[in-house]
Amino acid sequence: MNDRRQPVSAKKPRIGLTDKDLERLFEIHGTDSAAVLARRTKLPYLLIYNIVHRRVMSVSHRHYAALYGRPAPQQAALKVDGAAFRAMAELWLFLNDGVSRADLYRELFGLESHQKIDHRIFNGKVNTVDARIEHIMRQKFSDAGVDKQMLKQWLGEFDALPHSDWVPYTRIRPTLIYLWEKLGAHPTSLLNQSVVRYETGILKRVSRSTADRIEELKDKAEKELREDGKQDTEKIKESVFGGKCGYTLYSDIRDELLFLCRTTRRGAKYYLGRSPWTYENGRAKRIANWRARKILQDCDRFIRQSGALPLASLPQSRQWAQVSRLIDVLVARTAQLLSDKDGIAFEKRILRPSHTRVEYNNPYHGFTPFDMASRVLGMKPRAFDLMVARNCEIFRTVGKFAQRWYLPDLYLRELSGKKDFGLISAKYELMAKDDRRPRPIDACMN
């Protein structure tokens, strides 16, 4: 008995149907009724219905013969091996910094920015891709001036590169877990990609730029948590990742809202448009900016119109505003006292050098140019210039001239360390606000 097996024939590619093919089908059968076409071709009604309504864009050779009464013409394959496409896509992304896979996919398929993409054509999860897509990819290189021979050479060179622009997902996974646990930042929002694809192994690498950005966010989060670990998590999250456009955190206006509820007849719902229970229990965290502005404006208006209110009854942010006014009055009075005879003598004692000129001129301590000394002392340039102009004799004794004037770093450290120097600084800061004369430092030091 012969057990000679017949060779298995290759699967024939499906035949694409264009709008012209569909019009020709209607002309052959003299109707566009799905029911009549199904009866005449003896094909399933559902298949014919989907063809007529363009839900099926290709058919098999057998179905084509039943529809048109003749064998299908020779056509180029609708699907091709995706290896060449994936190589070209990776090279294109490498050469075009800032273009993501999602951007390339949407460009190839003509999708909108909000539509989902299928990463399987990039990671090899599907073996074949549309021949049309491969052709478009080759055409993109051709339009950029890369002919077939050069493209082949580039693909070979690119394949030999170590691809250091990609980072294994396992390397940044602990960072993603940290940001999720500490700040509730979902990994998908940081990866701009479903984290499930990475966790299931469909995707194994992230771009270097994405990995660096995630590490930078972690550093910012650690710094914020170190500086104020008791701060509201949402505030820390907003300072690290940025706020939501058009919205304000409820926690930022909570004190002002409660103050209005205590002191006026209007309830919280008047300002929030809903019960405050939703915000107090964390069901909602932000309110629209226009609502926040109304709360703050009504709060300030009520405080102005009410006259004297106990400082402790005001919202914390408004307490500081009232205290700032008091401090301004005290600073103004202090500046006035420092301008009389006893105040000037006190100022001279504070500014008087503590070391000899020889010590100040020692290069070991270093020198700072006059125009940069104000930054070292934490003063505005005009305030510093006024202080120098009023105390020329002191600054000449410690200053050093070498093509330009310098102050010894030793003397600047002394001033910064004196507890009463803040009074002198405040005096000249106040004077600088009202002083509009030319800067007097050149006349003083020359």
Image (cartoon, rainbow, N blue to C red):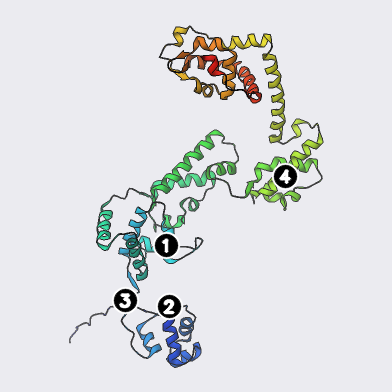
Q: Nearer the viewer, residue 23 or 120?
A: 23
Position of the N terminus, as image quadrant, is: bottom left
Residue located at (41% from left, 52% from top): 98
| Mark 2 or 4, nearer chain start | 2
Residue located at (73% from left, 42% from top): 297
Contact (Cβ within 8 Å) of mark 1 with mark 2: no
Q: Position of residue 141 (x, y in %)?
A: 33, 61
Residue located at (68% from left, 35% from top): 317
Q: Which mark is residue 105?
A: 1
Q: Which mark is residue 57?
A: 2
Q: Is residue 143 left or right of 354 when viewed as pictured?
A: left
Q: Amino acid at mark 2?
A: Met
Query: Which residue is denoted by mark 4 in the rendering?
Result: 295
How many numbered discs, if any?
4
Q: Which mark is residue 76?
A: 3
Q: 10 Å neighbourhood of mark 4: few (<14), some, or many (≥20)?
A: many
Above or below for 65 versus 235: below
Q: Amino acid at mark 4?
A: Ile
Q: Position of residue 156 (x, y in %)?
A: 25, 57
